[in-house]
Image (spheres, rainbow, N blue to C red):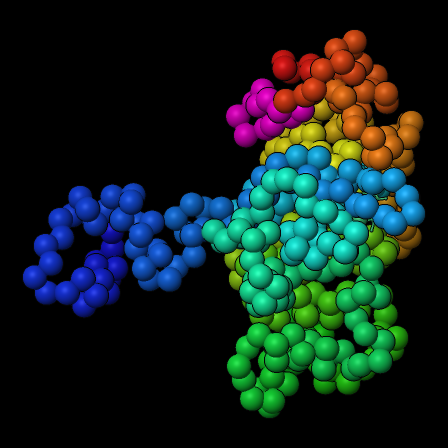
């Protein structure tokens, strides 16, 4: 243990307390020390956020229940860039909103847990959650219209996030907003500060939304299809910007996309979702070079054939067949009806996750079950 740590401990331990080196360096001490010094649990456990077996059902008034998340698990470590990949309706946005406990009122958390820096988010009161949202976890929502109020100048909207979470004078806040605007790539921040959202281009609005998200230096930023409305070259610029910010401030990013090419140059690890489940998870190398699940294989194969042109948006091609109906309980693998390697067992028994390769987990009968 570095000498400075011990020096800081001495006054608190008090004179006359006998402390041996083995006690000082043991794992139990490190955990307790982190707590004592008000350090977050992540420095001891190396887990920033942990979603465990989360199931969520929407209960619309006039329709059947939709099982949007089915025992989905995901771990995010500090500073990590994690991609969530999946077709439309696979539950990506539901997972993102659940991580902030921001699901609509017709959603029910059926089972599972969400821990963030050691705290059980599903058990926290709303006042505590409000302190976390924006300050510790920020969301870049799928709809840019949800992020910016059309009637308020963009600088004031960024300042509002700071006002809610950081104690500072009005003047300091304005200076800080201008610094943030420079950080996200505006050479002349003042005219941007005073602009309304409709006076900015799509790319400029997205930069403003990123400035707003990172204003309080959150530990985790969730970008839900943050670039899907932009053309390919702007998409690349925004991705490079988010990566740079993540590295500079050691912020973890969860980047959600239905398009593997968006995640390819950005994230370290990818979790693949299908029908509300995590069907495969692995590092970027494994997912792109050695995908295990037939669904991941299909997504990656299609992405290899799909070459987005520089200034246009091309729709990512779809896999043959329809995603499953999530109103009933699915026995076995939800991808089975579309799977070219379907076996009889795939629709007969429930699936468990296996880890055929170190740090690559998959839910597929091909890999034992
Ligand atoms: P996309 O790529 O289209 O954004 P997604 O992967 O983000 O899709 P979700 O938006 O999480 O998927 O939706 C998962 C499932 O839950 C879908 O079947 C969707 O229709 C359903 N759903 C989402 N929100 C609600 C809601 N408020 N009420 C009822 N069903 C909902
Ligand atoms: Mg979505």
Does residue 361 show up magenta in the picture?
yes
> Residue 205's quadrant in the figure?
bottom right
Position of 80 relative to 154 (above/below)? above
Residue 122, x across and y down, in percent? 59, 51
Residue 123, x across and y down, in percent? 56, 53
Q: Which residues are magenta?
A: 353-363
The residue nearer to you, when weighing 142 against 334, is: 334
Q: Residue at x 17, y 44 (%)?
A: 22
Q: Residue at x 81, y 46 (%)?
A: 59
Point out the image quarter for the C terminus.
top right
The residue nearer to you, when weighing 148 against 347, is: 347
Res. 86 in view? no
Residue 228, x across and y down, in percent? 82, 52
Q: Residue at x 62, y 36 (%)?
A: 53
Magenta: main secondary structure? strand
Position of 124 relative to 164 (above/below)? above
Q: Residue at x 65, y 25 (%)?
A: 362
Res. 241 in view? yes
**Left or right of 294 in this view: 181:** left
> Residue 6's quadrant in the figure?
bottom left
How many numbered badges does the structure rendering display? 0
Position of 10 relative to 263 (above/below)? below
Residue 160, x across and y down, in percent? 67, 79
**Left or right of 196 in this view: 163:** left
């Amino acid at each position: 243990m570095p000498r400075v740590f011990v020096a800081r401990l001495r006054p608190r331990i008090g004179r006359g307390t006998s402390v041996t080196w083995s006690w000082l360096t043991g794992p139990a001490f490190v955990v307790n020390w982190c707590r004592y010094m008000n350090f977050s649990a992540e420095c001891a456990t190396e887990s920033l956020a942990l979603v465990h077996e989360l199931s969520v059902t929407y209960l619309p008034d006039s329709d059947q229940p939709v099982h949007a998340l089915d025992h989905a698990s995901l771990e995010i470590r500090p500073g990590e860039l994690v991609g969530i990949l999946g077709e439309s309706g696979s539950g990506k946005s539901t997972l993102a909103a659940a991580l902030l406990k921001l699901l609509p009122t017709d959603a029910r958390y059926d089972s599972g847990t969400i821990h963030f820096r050691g705290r059980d988010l599903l058990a926290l009161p709303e006042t505590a959650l409000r302190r976390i949202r924006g300050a510790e976890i920020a969301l870049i929502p799928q709809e840019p219209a949800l992020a910016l109020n059309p009637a308020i100048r963009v600088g004031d909207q960024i300042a509002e996030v700071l006002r809610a979470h950081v104690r500072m004078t009005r003047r300091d806040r304005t200076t800080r907003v201008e610094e943030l605007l420079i950080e996200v790539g505006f050479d002349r921040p003042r005219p941007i500060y005073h602009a309304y959202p409709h006076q900015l281009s799509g790319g400029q609005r997205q930069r403003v939304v990123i400035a707003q998200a990172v204003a309080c230096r959150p530990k985790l930023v969730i970008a839900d299809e943050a670039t899907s409305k932009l053309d390919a070259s702007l998409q690349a610029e925004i991705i490079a910007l988010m990566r740079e910010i993540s590295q500079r401030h050691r912020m973890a990013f969860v980047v959600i996309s239905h398009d593997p090419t968006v995640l390819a140059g950005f994230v370290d690890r990818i979790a693949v979702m299908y029908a509300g489940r995590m069907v495969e998870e692995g590092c970027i190398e494994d997912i792109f070079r050695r995908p295990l699940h037939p669904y991941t294989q299909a997504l990656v194969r299609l992405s290899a054939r799909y070459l987005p042109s520089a200034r246009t948006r091309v729709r990512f091609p779809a896999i043959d067949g329809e995603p499953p109906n999530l109103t009933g309980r699915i026995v076995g693998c939800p991808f089975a009806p579309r799977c070219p390697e379907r076996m009889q067992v795939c629709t007969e028994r429930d699936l468990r996750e296996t880890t055929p390769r170190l740090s690559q987990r998959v839910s597929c009968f091909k890999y034992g079950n």
